[in-house]
Image: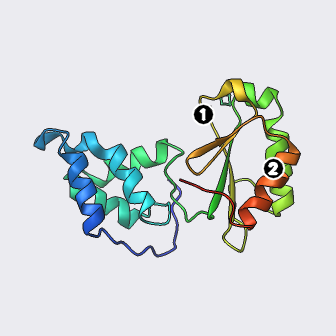
Amino acid sequence: MKHSNVKQIINIDAKLTDRINELLSHYPADKKKSALLPILHDVQDAHDNWLSIELMDKVAEILEIKPIEVYEVVSFYTMYNQQPIGKYMFEFCRTSCCCLRGAEDLMEYTCDKLGIQEGETTPDGNFTVVGVECLGACGYAPMMQLGDFYKEHLTKEKIDQLIDDCKDNKISLH
Ligand code: FES
């Protein structure tokens, strides 16, 4: 499991605690682990979109499960980030349909334009580029996820526009 040496400030504030308790209320008291995935989403959202070992340990404590039970979920799903990421994370689908429609070329084009390799973040902390598995929008290939939204039928021109819009703070992530 790759993890970061960056120190993360953990802040399970009252609002997040209420949200966690609300999620836990959907499950029996002895089945708290059932709420793990949605809780991880909310905890990650409240912590700059990534989960340090210390934060995962805190989630394990809240759910009264072993830390390894959190690590194995976080390391399996690409929607959980184990490293600090850029403000804008371009998640390119690179499964078959998107690949056949040029997703890998577009990802390489984006990385070259931003001066980074896949999996890296630009020095200004603005952009991260990663490849992920099928996002279920195969009919709109090639596509990527940016925040909570899908960007579909991608072309180099659309990538250029997206990067410009991100730089101009014109992109909504939620
Ligand atoms: S193959 Fe890309 S969304 Fe399914």
* Residue occupying the point 73% across, 25% down: 97
Q: Nearer the viewer, residue 127 or 117?
A: 127
The residue beneath circle 1 is: 135
Compared to 10, does 78 lie above or below?
Answer: above
**Is disc 1's CB within 8 Å of ligand 1?**
yes
Image color mode: rainbow
Crowd class of label 1 (few under 14; some 14 to 19; many from 20; radius 10 Å): some
Compared to 161, does 86 lie above or below?
Answer: below
Amino acid at circle 1: Leu
Q: Is residue 66 left or right of residue 122?
A: left
Q: Secondary structure at mark 1?
A: loop
User: Which numbered tag is attached to residue 92?
Assistant: none
Amino acid at circle 2: Ile
* Residue occupying the point 70% across, 23% down: 139
* Residue occupying the point 20% across, 53% down: 21
Foreground tag (2 vs 1):
2
Mark 2 vs 1, N-terminal side: 1
Q: How far across and how far down the image is residue 13, in percent?
A: 29, 70
Rendered-image quarter of ligand 1: top right
Q: Residue furthest left?
A: 29
Q: How far across and how far down the image is residue 134, in percent?
A: 62, 31
The residue beneath circle 2 is: 159
Q: How far across and how far down the image is residue 137, in percent?
A: 64, 29
Which image quadrant for residue 104? top right
Compared to 127, does 37 lie above or below?
Answer: above
Any part of residue 21 in sight: yes
Any part of residue 96 in sight: no
Which image quadrant for residue 129? bottom right
